[in-house]
Image: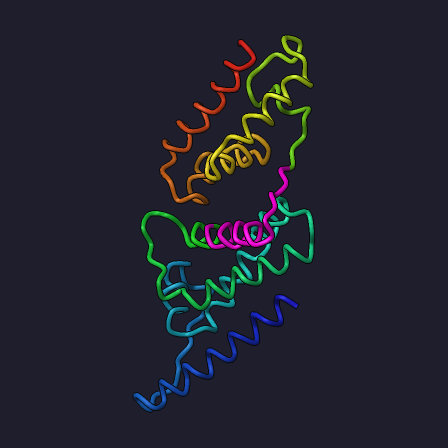
Amino acid sequence: MTHVLIETMIRARLNTKKEKSVRQSGMKVSYRKKDSLSEEEIVMLAKEDPTYFDFLYRKHFQAIFLFINRRTAREQLTKDIVQNTFIKAMLNIHKFEYKGFPFSSWLYRIALNELNQYFRDKNTTRMISFDSKEIPETLEIDDEQVDKDALISILMNEIDQLKETDLLLIEMHFFEKRSYKEISEILGIKEGNAKVKVHRIKERIRKRINL
């Protein structure tokens, strides 16, 4: 359903663009082979020709879907949020500018805004998925030094007090095993900044358990 709606909107916007182009210049729309273009070039073309957005949609759909689904664990809700994400991206692509981060970074931030808006509207909190067995290793703690249940309790208490951005850092670094480079691209922050934030959170938890 998501693919069909996006494709329908692309065709509708393409028809509008074509009509406008014909009225303004009487020239036909020309197309270039997408496989010979960089993503930056495709983004620039997509601002004028919606058919190029289809390439961006298909390239990034799975990553955005998995990113959202991990935070909802509800397939239909995930589909709705992903659909809204790509619709907003298509309608606002003219606002996108490269500022040191890839196009996917912009998509992730739109997806996060849609996700957060959903939970605000429903006045509820979102879930966090992780494997408790990996926590000692992630925090660089010898699992024989501390009671695992106590550690999980401390971690959950810390998570409850985190800002949304810091919570995302915890999720992506601790539980999703994303690199600092990938985290920086998703959040639109410098890689060094991501490292510092994660280190501070990790040290705060370690101090809480007196290690």
Taken as a whole, is the magenta stretch helix, strand or loop?
A: helix
Horizontal placement of 169 versus 155: left or right?
left
Q: Quadrant of residue 196?
A: top left
Q: Position of residue 39 (x, y in %)?
A: 42, 58
Q: Position of residue 69 (x, y in %)?
A: 63, 49
Q: Quadrant of residue 48?
A: bottom left
Q: Residue at x 58, y 57 (%)?
A: 81
Q: Residue at x 68, y 24 (%)?
A: 133
Horizontal placement of 176 versus 90: left or right?
right
Q: Nearer the viewer, residue 39 or 104?
A: 104
Examine the rendered structure and indicate whether residue 86 appears above or below residue 8.
above
Total numbered circles: 0
Which quadrant of the figure contains the N terminus? bottom right
Q: Position of residue 53 (x, y in %)?
A: 47, 67
Q: Quadrant of residue 193?
A: top left
Q: Which residues are magenta?
A: 109-128
Q: Residue at x 37, y 48 (%)?
A: 101
Per the image, is 112 magenta?
A: yes
Q: Position of residue 70 (x, y in %)?
A: 63, 44
Examine the rendered structure and indicate whether residue 73 appears above or below residue 77.
above
Q: How is the image coloured?
A: rainbow
Q: Nearer the viewer, residue 99 or 35?
A: 99
Examine the rendered structure and indicate whether residue 32 appears above or below residue 74.
below
Q: Residue at x 41, y 87 (%)?
A: 19
Horizontal placement of 109 versus 66: left or right?
left
Per the image, is 211 magenta?
A: no
